[in-house]
Amino acid sequence: MKILVFTEKPFAPAAVEAISNVVNASGNDLEVVEKGSREDLLNAVKDANGLIVRSDVIDDAVMNAAPELKVIVRAGAGYDNIDLAAATKHGICVMNTPGQNSNAVAELVFGMIVMMCRNKYNGKSGSELKGKSLGIYAFGQVGRNVARIAKGFNMNIEALDVFVPDEVIEAEGVKPLHDVNELFSQNDFVSLHIPATPQTKHSIGYDLVMKMPKGGVLINTARKEIIDEPGLIRALEERPDLRYISDIKPDTAEEFEKKFADRVFFTPKKMGAQTAEANFNAGVAAAEQAIAYLKDGWNRFQVNK
Ligand code: 3PG
């Protein structure tokens, strides 16, 4: 059977080699298309039985072009790029690879926080993280890794996640919260890890951000869609002490950068999962999951049940 790896943003070469070894050892065939166009995708899926992607958009039209497709594995956490209803309609199993790239994202959170707190290393005196408070919005795999690292900085940590019992959050030495207003009003740093869903889209804007204490820093390594950009711009205009860091360039990045040059930072391309280790772990897990599904229907991480 053919497994297609289609990634607009390529995996590290070592990850591709490892995926290739895993697929070859299973007796399946592998095709890798990197930096391909939509047309390339529509061509390559024609005879694919399994498809491995990252943030690449997989919609009904792609599935229509793929009559043999049985399984799509998103090598990563968020699957908002895949039309789950269409997949279910086509009888295709969709899985993600939870936890495989979460440390990489969490490390980037702190890389960007330190950079911002040291004024992008411009020579002016900055500030430290020790003793400051961090609010983690969603305590999934990334949120937990963020908490683990924050402890090393001696930060006070709180987290809000309606799907995670208090005991689980407390077991990590983190104070559970139940009100998003508290998360924003009580923390010097708020790190966002919620998925993009109809409920969360544009949910972080003026009202919440204005609640942040003096000097507050908002960090977004989740999805750009969760931000209400005009609302955040308004808050940054009214509060010259606030700062915003994001691993996903906002749609209105130019306006942010023009108005708040020193107070915002955006990676040019989403970099959270872009480490050799995360690429390797997520890529190999995706290949193993696709193979296991094609072999005997293994579907532990199916997200379109
Ligand atoms: C994820 O959801 O796993 C991360 O956002 C990483 O996405 P990427 O694989 O497109 O870099």
Image (spheres, helix red, strand yellow):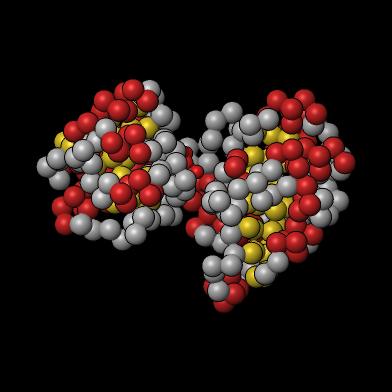
Q: Is residue 94 above or below residue 6?
A: below
* Image quarter (top left, top right, bottom left or bottom right) of the C terminus: bottom left
Quadrant in which residue 86 is drawn: top left
Q: Residue furthest left?
A: 27
Q: Residue furthest front?
A: 89
* Image quarter (top left, top right, bottom left or bottom right) of the N terminus: top left
Tell me if 157 is positioned left or right of 46 in this view. right
Quadrant in which residue 259 is drawn: top right
Question: Can you give x and y, in whole percent of width and height, for residue 96 in the image?
Answer: 38, 51
Q: Residue furthest bottom?
A: 167
Tell me if 104 is positioned left or right of 276 in this view. right
> Foreground: 15 or 77?
77
Residue drawn where x is 22% and y is 53% of the image? 293
> Foreground: 157 or 136?
136
Tell me if 259 is positioned left or right of 200 in this view. right
Question: Can you give x and y, in whole percent of width and height, for residue 154 in the image?
Answer: 70, 60
> Foreground: 169 or 61?
61
Total labels: the figure holds 0
Tell me if 105 is positioned left or right of 4 in this view. right
Residue 286 seen in render? no
Residue drawn where x is 59% and y is 37% of the image? 248
Q: Is residue 283 above or below residue 305?
A: above
Question: Can you give x and y, in whole percent of width and height, for residue 83 in the image?
Answer: 40, 44
Residue drawn where x is 54% and y is 69% of the image? 164
> Foreground: 21 or 228?
228
Residue drawn where x is 28% and y is 36% of the image? 64
Residue 89 seen in render? yes
Question: Can you give x and y, in whole percent of width and height, for residue 132 in the image?
Answer: 76, 57
